[in-house]
């Protein structure tokens, strides 16, 4: 079951070209997953775009959902080059994005990255603040300074974070696929 209201279709035209994708377990006797897509409006607020109820988080269900979103939001191949998708690596989503929206840029949710850091044992407010500082930096030098702060806090956390490509979570090192191919 898929929903994309007319108001969402019209409102997307005035949103930033950023779509946050997420999936949630439905805990009823029927089970399944709720897939969601939200945008960012002109007031930096969450703007609901579409949602679907599917049997599970698979490449096929994500591909189906993304194809319907592309159709309803009128995302052309040209517009896809300017599109940024944000997710937390749900099952099947990354291969579906490569198949359906190959020219869109992909970023990972820093909140989920921080959650994974906590699961890896890198805890504390100072670490959380340092991660968010690094994610929000807009120049390579300021990002390097923020990463040095993380290194001072915990060398292992710095190494753990170094295994993740900075262009996928940091503003300063992020470029769109269109910018990469134009170089």
Image (spheres, helix red, strand yellow):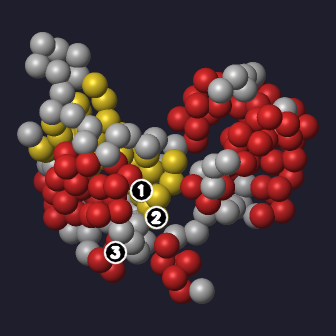
Q: Residues within 10 Å of mark 3 (few under 14, many from 20)?
A: few
* Above or below, comparing residue 50 to residue 129 in the picture: below
Outermost residue, bottom side: 182
Disc 2/disc 3 C-alpha distance (Å): 12 Å
Disc 2 secondary structure class: strand
Outermost residue, top side: 29
Asked if disc 2 and disc 3 are in contact, CB closer than 8 Å, the reply is no
**Would residue 156 be seen by someone viewing this image from the given angle?**
yes
Q: Nearer the viewer, mark 2 or mark 3?
A: 2
Work out which quarter of the rendered image holds the C terminus and state it: bottom right
Residue placed most toward the observer, 167 or 98 = 98
Q: Residue at x 33, y 80 (%)?
A: 78
Disc on the earlier residue, 2 or 3: 3
Asked if disc 1 and disc 2 are in contact, CB closer than 8 Å, the reply is yes
Q: Position of residue 178 (x, y in %)?
A: 48, 78
Residue placed most toward the observer, 124 or 162 = 162
Disc 1 secondary structure class: strand
Q: Residue at x 71, y 40 (%)?
A: 160
Pointer 1 residue: 85
Q: Which mark is drawn over residue 79?
A: 3
Q: Residues within 10 Å of mark 2 (few under 14, many from 20)?
A: many
**Would residue 13 be seen by someone viewing this image from the given angle?**
no
Q: Position of residue 127 (x, y in %)?
A: 76, 31
Q: Position of residue 133 (x, y in %)?
A: 74, 44
Q: Residue at x 40, y 67 (%)?
A: 104
* Above or below, comparing residue 87 to residue 176 in the picture: above
Disc 1/disc 2 C-alpha distance (Å): 6 Å
- Where residue 22 sits, quadrant-wise, is top left
Pointer 2 residue: 105
Disc 3 secondary structure class: helix
Disc 3/disc 1 C-alpha distance (Å): 13 Å
Disc on the earlier residue, 1 or 2: 1
């Amino acid at each position: 079951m898929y929903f994309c209201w007319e108001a969402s279709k019209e409102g997307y035209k005035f949103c930033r070209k950023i779509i946050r994708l997420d999936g949630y377990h439905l805990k009823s006797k029927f089970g399944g997953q709720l897939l969601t897509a939200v945008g960012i409006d002109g007031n930096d607020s969450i703007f609901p775009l579409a949602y679907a109820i599917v049997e599970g988080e698979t490449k096929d269900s994500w591909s189906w959902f993304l194809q319907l979103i592309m159709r309803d939001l009128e995302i052309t191949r040209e517009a896809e080059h300017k599109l940024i998708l944000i997710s937390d690596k749900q099952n099947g989503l990354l291969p579906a994005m490569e198949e359906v929206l190959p020219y869109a840029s992909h970023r990972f949710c820093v909140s989920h990255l921080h959650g994974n850091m906590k699961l890896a044992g890198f805890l504390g407010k100072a670490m959380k603040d340092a991660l968010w500082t690094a994610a929000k930096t807009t120049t390579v030098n300021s990002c390097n300074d923020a990463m040095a702060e993380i290194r001072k806090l915990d060398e292992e956390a710095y190494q753990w974070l170094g295994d993740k490509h900075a262009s996928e979570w940091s503003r300063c090192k992020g470029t769109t696929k269109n910018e990469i191919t134009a170089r």
